[in-house]
Image (cartoon, rainbow, N blue to C red):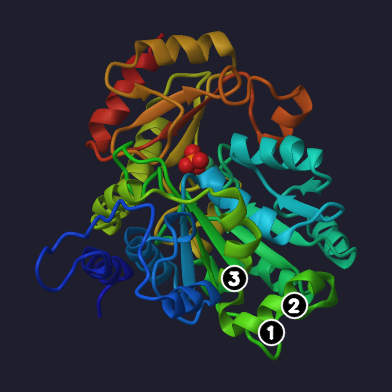
């Protein structure tokens, strides 16, 4: 029996390769594509002929990446986008309308939070937030017909772990579409298999891994034309896509109601570079998740009084049981340090010799950042509290280095 990682490593190493000629993925950075005849042009525009129309709505290099990511997530199709934020915007603008409400569960990446709270609010899309285990609010909101449920597989930077299956079972019961941000846990969590409708990634993070191309992706399931959440009357404006595109309805909805008109499309060059990273994703994810646990264990044992490490692999973490049962192969590259005060957090960061201070996560190198003074600086006290951003919080994203060497860097920096 092979492990999941052996399987996915094999799959991803081969997913972007060609069988003959150039083995690496072909990059076709062309904005436009010629049509054989007027009839073919008509067929391409109607969707009957599967050939590139114009790069904003799809191009062959993106298609290769999309096929690989759809396989990785066990999805029916995928769309590569210019960034992770582009992926979130794609899904939400395609499905939601003014007056609709999105229920956001758990902790969120800063950009997602402002997208929902500020930007979409300007366009009349409402939002509500609740904690991951607040099932009373979740059920009440679902019964009040929220249009979409959004959550992250692992709260960033709170590191709260949701009961993904339980939330998705409720979404299904109330016929409400779910969108899961799986950026932190590619290969570790497969939300579509747990009942999610749409999954998104910022491929900028671990999927490429080397802080190269900015990118994102949306992966979706097939639509059941007889019995599907999409056929609920609250999604009436989307029914015509189910009628016309059948099981490919999500592709049609996402392209025709957002990508075509708003253009958050990935560039062929970015998709090409992203595929180079994807080939080694399984190996890197396995290494990083073992290292996060190791670094957390060393720091938990050796950090001086007043600084604590938070990671659900630690036995005293409130999420430890869920980590063991639902995140058996790890929950991604993040851990956090609670330093008590901003001054102490700054002093620690400024003494780090190897760890890089940056706003990114999911890099091949270990990264760290003080949260309250950077990504969350414009947030109110109340919002920060909800997101678990305290004055002394440092977010750490573990990379491919030796975990012992990285732990040593934190320990020498913490010896204030
Ligand atoms: C980085 C990130 C995003 C946004 O992705 P970009 O590629 O930077 O636009 C969304 N969600 C999570 C969890 C992220 O870490």
Which comes before the other along the chain, label 3 or label 1?
Answer: 1
Q: Are marks 2 and 1 in contact (CB under 8 Å)?
A: yes
Give x and y (percent) for residue 191. 54, 66
Q: Foreground: 306 or 155?
A: 155
Tell me the CA gap for discs 3 and 1: 11 Å
Mark drawn on residue 243: 1
Point 44% across, 59% down: residue:
54
Mark drawn on residue 239: 2
Q: Is residue 80 above or below residue 308?
A: below
Tell me the CA gap for discs 3 and 2: 11 Å
What secondary structure is found at the residue carrying circle 3? helix
Q: Which residue is the extreme one toward the bottom?
A: 226
Please state, as top left, top right, bottom left or bottom right, where the N terminus lies in the image. bottom left
Q: Is residue 60 above or below residue 215?
A: below
Q: Are marks 3 and 2 in contact (CB under 8 Å)?
A: no
What secondary structure is found at the residue carrying circle 1? helix
The answer to whether residue 121 shows anywhere in this view is yes
**Left or right side of 12 for 233:** right
Which comes before the other along the chain, label 3 or label 2?
Answer: 2
The answer to whether residue 196 shows anywhere in this view is no
Point 77% across, 74% down: residue:
175
């Amino acid at each position: 029996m092979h492990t999941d990682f052996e399987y996915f490593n094999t799959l991803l190493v081969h997913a972007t390769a060609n069988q003959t000629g150039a083995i690496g993925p072909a990059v076709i950075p062309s904005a436009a594509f010629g049509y054989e005849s007027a009839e073919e042009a008509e067929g391409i525009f109607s969707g009957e002929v599967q050939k590139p129309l114009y790069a904003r709505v799809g191009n062959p290099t993106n298609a290769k990446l999309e096929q690989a990511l759809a396989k990785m997530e066990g999805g029916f199709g995928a769309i590569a986008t210019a960034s992770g934020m582009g992926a979130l915007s794609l899904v939400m603008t395609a499905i939601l309308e003014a007056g609709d409400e999105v229920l956001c569960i758990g902790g969120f990446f800063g950009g997602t939070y402002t997208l929902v709270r500020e930007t979409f609010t300007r366009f009349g899309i409402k939002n509500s937030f609740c904690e991951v285990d607040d099932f009373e609010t979740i059920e009440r909101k679902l019964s009040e017909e929220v249009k979409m449920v959004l959550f992250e597989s692992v709260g960033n930077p709170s590191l709260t772990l949701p009961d993904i299956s339980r939330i998705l079972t409720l979404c299904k019961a109330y016929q409400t579409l779910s969108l899961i941000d799986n950026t932190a846990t590619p290969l570790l969590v497969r939300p579509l298999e747990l009942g999610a409708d749409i999954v998104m990634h910022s491929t900028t993070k671990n999927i490429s891994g080397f802080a190269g191309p900015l990118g994102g992706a949306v992966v979706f399931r097939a639509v059941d034309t007889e019995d599907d959440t999409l056929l609920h009357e609250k999604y009436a404006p989307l029914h015509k896509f189910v009628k016309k595109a059948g099981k490919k309805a999500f592709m049609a909805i996402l392209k025709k109601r957002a990508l075509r008109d708003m253009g958050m499309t990935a560039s062929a060059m970015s998709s090409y570079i992203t595929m180079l990273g994807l080939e080694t994703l399984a190996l890197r994810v396995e290494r990083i998740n073992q290292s996060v646990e190791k670094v957390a264990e060393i720091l938990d044992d050796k950090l001086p009084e007043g600084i604590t490490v938070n990671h659900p692999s630690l036995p005293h973490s409130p999420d430890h049981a869920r980590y063991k049962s639902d995140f058996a192969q790890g929950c991604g590259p993040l851990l956090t340090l609670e330093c008590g005060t901003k001054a102490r957090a700054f002093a620690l960061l400024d003494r780090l010799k190897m760890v890089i201070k940056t706003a990114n996560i999911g890099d091949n190198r270990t990264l760290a950042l003080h949260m309250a003074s950077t990504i969350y600086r414009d947030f109110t006290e109340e919002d920060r509290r909800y997101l678990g951003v305290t004055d002394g919080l440092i977010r750490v994203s573990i990379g491919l280095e030796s975990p012992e060497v990285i732990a040593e860097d934190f320990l020498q920096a913490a010896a204030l």
